[in-house]
Amino acid sequence: MALLSFLFPSKPKTASAAKERLQIIIARERNGRSGPDFLPALHKELIDVISKYTKVNPEDIKISLDRQGNLEVLDVNVVLPDSQ
């Protein structure tokens, strides 16, 4: 079995990779960075990932970062097309 694992390594799960990316982004922002400059990159990455599974208009994906005191809320709103 070790030989098969060596020849055919398992791919990392998409959900866990996305979770790690978000944790890195949040950690960077909490370490004193002043602005949400990661939002454009996150927006592009979301468009790329969602486009793999369904046709979506990039304008239908909205991302915002709201700060309320010491809380930060990352809001992602995706409008998916009607399935026909």
Image (cartoon, rainbow, N blue to C red):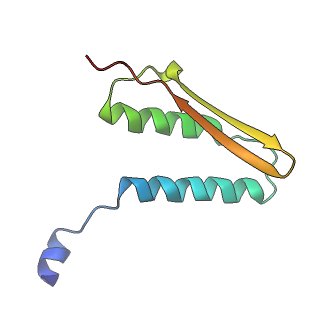
Q: Residue at x 87, y 47 (%)?
A: 69
- Residue 81 position in % (x across, y down): 38, 20
2 lies above or below 61: below
In-image side of 69 versus 40 (left or right): right
Q: Residue at x 52, y 19 (%)?
A: 59
Viewport quadrant of the N terminus: bottom left
- Residue 5 position in % (x across, y down): 18, 75
- Residue 51 position in % (x across, y down): 36, 31
Q: Residue at x 68, y 60 (%)?
A: 27
In-image side of 61 versus 27 (left or right): left
Determine which quarter of the picture holds residue 43. top right
Q: Residue at x 12, y 75 (%)?
A: 4
Q: Please tell me which residue lies in front, 49 or 3.
A: 49
Viewport quadrant of the C terminus: top left
Determine the residue located farthest toward the right in the rendered image.
69
Determine which quarter of the picture holds residue 6. bottom left
3 lies above or below 35: below
In-image side of 23 versus 4 (left or right): right
Determine which quarter of the picture holds residue 48. top left
In-image side of 48 versus 63 (left or right): left
11 lies above or below 5: above
Determine the residue located farthest toward the bottom in the rendered image.
2
